[in-house]
Each structure stands twice: as C-alpha cells, then as structure tokens.
Image (cartoon, rainbow, N blue to C red):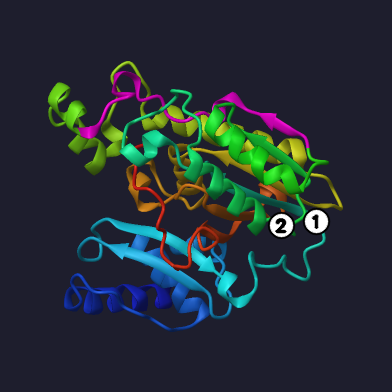
Amino acid sequence: VLDLYRQAEEFWQEIIPNHDNETILITAHNGINRCLILSALGMSPSYYHTIQQSNCCINVLNFNGKLGDEVQLESLNQTSHLGLPLPDFRPEQKQGLRLLLVRHGETEWNRMSRFQGVKDIPLNDNGRQQAQKASDFLKDITIDFAVTSPLLRPKETAEIILQNHSEVTLTTKKDLEEISHGLWEGKLEKEIEAEYPGLLAQWKEKPETVQMPEGENLDQVWERAVNSWHEIIKENLEEGKMKTGLVTAHDAINKVIICYLLGLKPANFWNIKQGNGAVTVIDYPKGLEGMPIFQAIDITTHLSDSVFDRTAMGAL
C-alpha cells in the first residue's frame, strides 16, 4: 500500500500541472483509486480500507492547484448509474450498522447564500422537492431507525424521507444542530466582510482558526458532533443484527463527522462537499471497535441527471 500511495502521489504531481481548468477522466483499479483519493486529500495510507471502490463507480475530485493545495472530495463511489442506488452490504457481513448521513434540503437562505447557522429556517419548495427525491431514492432501502437535528430543515427532510418508512420513529439530538455563526447569522458575505474585515477570508482559508463572533469554533462543533455520532452508534448496535439508520443534519456537522472518520482535522473542513439532499453511506461491520467503511460520500445523482453535485452553493 505504501508503494501504491507513492505511485499515486507521483501520478498527481505529473498530471495536475498539465491540465489546469480541465476535466480529467481517470480509469484505473480498486487499489490505485483508493490511493489516489487518499493522497489527494492528504489522508494517511492507514485509511486504505475505509473507502469503497465498486466496479465502474464514479468519484469526483476538485483540485484548486497542485498536489498539497486544497482538494475537494465532491463525491465517492457513485453507483446509481449501474442500477444500484447504494452499494450492497458485503456478503460475509452478518451484523453491524449502516448509517445514511443526509444533509437537509435547500432553504431560501441557502439559495441566497445567507448564513443561517442555528437560525431555524425551513425548507423552500426546491428543498422539499430534494427531500422527496431523496425519499424516492431510498424507498427500497430498509431503514430501522432515524435521528435528526431538531432544527426545521433537517427534521422536515427526515420526515419526507420517512414517508416510505412509516413504521420508523424519528428521534432528535440537539448536538446535531448546525454550527452557530453567532453575529454572522442572517447576513450575506458582503455584509460580513464590511463588519468583520478579513475574517470571512480566514474562514475560507483556515477555518480551524476562526471563532465566530458570539458563536462557535470548529473544535466545539467537532466535539459535540462526534460525541453525538458515537451515541447514535452505541444506542443502535445489536449483536447478531444488521441495522440501517437515517441521520439528517447540516453542512458543517456532516463535514466534521466525515473528516473525523477519515482521519482528517478541522483544517480539512473544506476538503469535503455536502450538497443539499446528498446521501453519504457509512458502514460499521465491527461496531465502534473497528474502522468504518465509506460506501459512498455526497451522492446527489437522485437530484439531477448529472454525476456532478448541482445543489446550491449557499452559505451554511
């Protein structure tokens, strides 16, 4: 794996400088694909087994410069074009947990790029349509339990998804609430820049260093989101059973959880994309004692006909 990881690094160093502002199609193999993704994101080779690569799956990586500059993982292991909405459980897997981590649908503030944080903004019509498409996408998937942030936008998203799973009770966890942006909430970027010169650029470049005015920082969000995630796993693991749970939350919460599980840090916050209505699939074949397996990240193909995430690029 270490040899393959170095091979992947050398490939990126050779290829990326020659294709500025272009889209590159790379077809390869399971092992090298994993190492290409790991090395692009600066992940440790020890996480080799945490990412799944199905036959003919599609991954999307967005480079903003050379290897070592910011790279965004837009999506991992898309398989819906194969008639397989989500990758199957491994045949040998007889017990464990699968969590479907979903970001809420679009709100009017998302569309406007207005920071919302813990302001309780409901879904807009497009957001409800996104939630309905997620519901249709997951209608044939067995769901055994569901947990949501108590804010309106993820709660309504979960309720729409669960229309096809009426037997499932939806519970809430307050620690899944979005990051508190404090005095930024309700404001557009130009308004934030006018009132807090330079702080927005710092948030985009070094998010781990920013304390939101009268709000939170990423370390605080990291602690409560990861603790809540572990609680969900502990509360729902059952020996000898395979269970699937729905977790609906927010952009920052989902990114923090994914970063943590991939061995990344708060500084890597922008390396992960989470579209409105996107589905991420995480398996725990050995419970909390074993490493999780990402079967898919940021699947949005149910929302449009594109392999690319076309959801709003709005504020958090």
Check if residue 107 falls in the magenta segment. no
Sequence-wise, the earlier of marks 1 and 2 is: 1
Write down the residue under mark 1: 95
Q: Which residue shows up at 36% across the image and 52% down it?
A: 271
Amino acid at circle 1: Gln
Callout 1 touching callout 2 (CB < 8 Å): yes
Q: What stretch of residues is rendered in magenta?
A: 169-189
Circle 1: element type? loop
Amino acid at circle 2: Pro
Q: Is residue 211 left or right of residue 5?
A: left
Q: Nearer the viewer, residue 125 or 158?
A: 125
Which image quadrant: the C terminus? top left
Q: Which residue shows up at 78% across the image and 69% down it?
A: 92
Check if residue 171 falls in the magenta segment. yes
Q: Which residue shows up at 42% across the image and 83% down it?
A: 27
Disc number placed over residue 215 in the picture, else none: none
Q: Return the x and y of residue 254 as percentages of the image width and height.
A: 49, 43
Write down the residue under mark 2: 285
Q: Return the x and y of residue 198 as percentages of the image width and height.
A: 14, 31
For disc 2, the neighbor class at 10 Å (few under 14, some 14 to 19, many from 20) is many
Q: Return the x and y of residue 186 as percentages of the image width and height.
A: 33, 24
Q: Nearer the viewer, residue 158 or 129?
A: 129
